[in-house]
């Protein structure tokens, strides 16, 4: 009877571990799918650039909405990270890419023309040189699939 109890407890423990693993995996998958939406938004914007802008990096008047769209995309991504909806791995890539792209003349000039209140999360990211807006510890991040 004692052996049977240990077997049942072992199977129960394995089932609980498996269920927890499945929940974490599901969380990771949800984050990845969500992040893919933002990657798609990025490529839609980049595909709308004029050939001149894509080749030279200098935006023409018709490219300004695309530049603004990218700045808004960055603001949205930073906000999502602040809320814990973007994984650590993806955030590492996005931060570097964002800082590089907004340093380009077309984006930095456009940002300079806007009110100081506009894109405050993006401005804070630039000011702090990429400081993570998510203020959570490692354990919280891992248990939430980040």
Image (cartoon, rainbow, N blue to C red):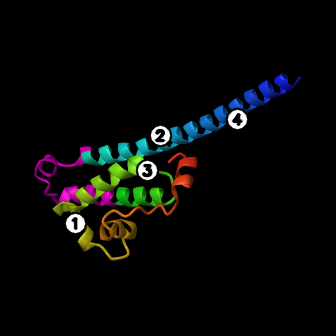
Which residue lies at the image location 23% right of the left edge and 57% below the top edge? 100
Q: How far apart are marks 1 and 4 (CA)?
A: 51 Å
Labels 2 & 4 near each other (Cβ < 8 A):
no
Camera-side residue of 105 and 141 = 141
Which residue lies at the image location 45% right of the left edge and 60% below the top edge? 79
Where does label 1 land, which residue? 108
Q: Distance between the residues labelled 3 and 4?
A: 26 Å
How packed mark 3 is, by other alpha carbons closer than 10 Å (few <14, some 14-19, many 20 or more), is some
Labels 2 & 1 near each other (Cβ < 8 A):
no
Where does label 3 land, which residue? 88
Q: Please state the extent of the stretch shown in magenta in the rendering.
A: 47-71
Which circle, 1 or 4, is nearer the viewer? 4
SS assignment for the magenta stretch, majority: helix
Q: Residue 16 carries which label?
A: 4
Q: Which mark is residue 33?
A: 2
Which residue lies at the image location 41% right of the left edge and 59% below the top edge? 78
């Amino acid at each position: 009877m004692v052996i049977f109890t240990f077997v049942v407890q072992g199977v129960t423990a394995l089932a609980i571990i498996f269920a927890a693993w499945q929940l974490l995996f599901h969380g990771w998958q949800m984050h990845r799918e969500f992040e893919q939406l933002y990657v798609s938004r990025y490529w839609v914007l980049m595909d709308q650039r004029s050939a001149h802008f894509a080749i030279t990096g200098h935006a023409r008047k018709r490219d300004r909405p695309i530049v603004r769209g990218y700045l808004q995309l960055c603001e949205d991504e930073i906000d999502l990270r602040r809320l814990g909806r973007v994984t650590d791995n993806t955030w590492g890539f996005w931060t570097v890419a964002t800082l590089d792209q907004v340093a380009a003349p077309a984006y930095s000039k456009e940002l300079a023309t806007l009110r100081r209140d506009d894109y405050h999360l993006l401005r804070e990211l630039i000011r702090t040189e990429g400081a993570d807006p998510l203020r959570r510890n490692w354990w919280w991040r891992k248990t939430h699939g980040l």
